[in-house]
Amino acid sequence: MFGFLKRRAPEGPVQFEVAVEVDRPASDVYPLLDWSDPRNAKRELGHKVEPIDGQADRFRLTLTEMPKHRFDMTVTKAVANEAYAFSTEIKPRIGRLENDEEHYSLEPIGDNRCKLRLTTIATFQSGLTKGQFKQELAMMTVACQRALVKLKAHAEHGVQAVKALDSAFYG
């Protein structure tokens, strides 16, 4: 009742940006991002990553803890050791996220360090209340930060460090 009185959230995509310095060169970090590389972070964590219909720019990720969901990625930019970007379609949808794009950039800082930046452009379902929108913003902010923390840990300390973080994050 009186749902029409609730304030609605703004419509359209929302941009999130986070960055972290990694004590490894960009050439060590880039393979963790690249869906086609056997050293891809998700692959190394035991998740399934496979090309879609043999296409070089499309991949399906199946997470071990979510086997009924499919994450179909389309690579939109791949410049070795510099930039990697892709859009993701999730079926069935998770929460209120309609779609997202992830843009990673790598900037060298000396010989053995780099800055890893993630810009995520997320579109949430329309008609959200302001409260629902704020909740989605908070969850996406945390997700972006965790993604970079895990990539940093993976690059610097290996897959076991990421597993330890996952255990701390998710119990």
Image (cartoon, helix red, strand yellow):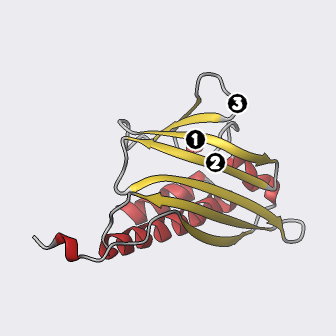
Where is residue 109, by image quadrant? bottom right
Mark 1 or mark 2: name the one nearer the start of the chain: 1
Q: CA distance from mark 1 to mark 2?
A: 6 Å
**Mark 3 — residue?**
56
How many residues crowd around disc 2 within 10 Å: few (fewer than 14), some, or many (20 or more)? many
Looking at the rendered structure, the kind of residue marked 2 is Phe
Looking at the rendered structure, the kind of residue marked 3 is Ala
Q: Is residue 168 left or right of residue 149?
A: left
Q: Is residue 59 left or right of residue 131?
A: right
Looking at the image, which residue is at 72% across and 51% down?
Answer: 84
Q: Residue 86 got which mark?
A: 2
Q: Residue 24 got which mark?
A: none
Residue at far front of view: 4
Mark 1 lies on a secondary structure that is strand
Mark 3 lies on a secondary structure that is loop
How many residues crowd around disc 1 within 10 Å: few (fewer than 14), some, or many (20 or more)? many
Is the C-beta separation of discs 1 and 2 under 8 Å?
Answer: yes
Q: CA distance from mark 2 to mark 3?
A: 13 Å
**71 is higher (above) or lower (below) than 118:** above
Residue at far top of view: 53
Looking at the rendered structure, the kind of residue marked 1 is Met
| Image quadrant where one finds the C terminus | bottom left
Q: Residue 73 got which mark?
A: 1
Residue in the foreground of this view, choosing between 10 and 99:
10
Looking at the image, which residue is at 67% across and 72% down?
Answer: 20
The image position of residue 162, as x and y in percent, is 54, 57
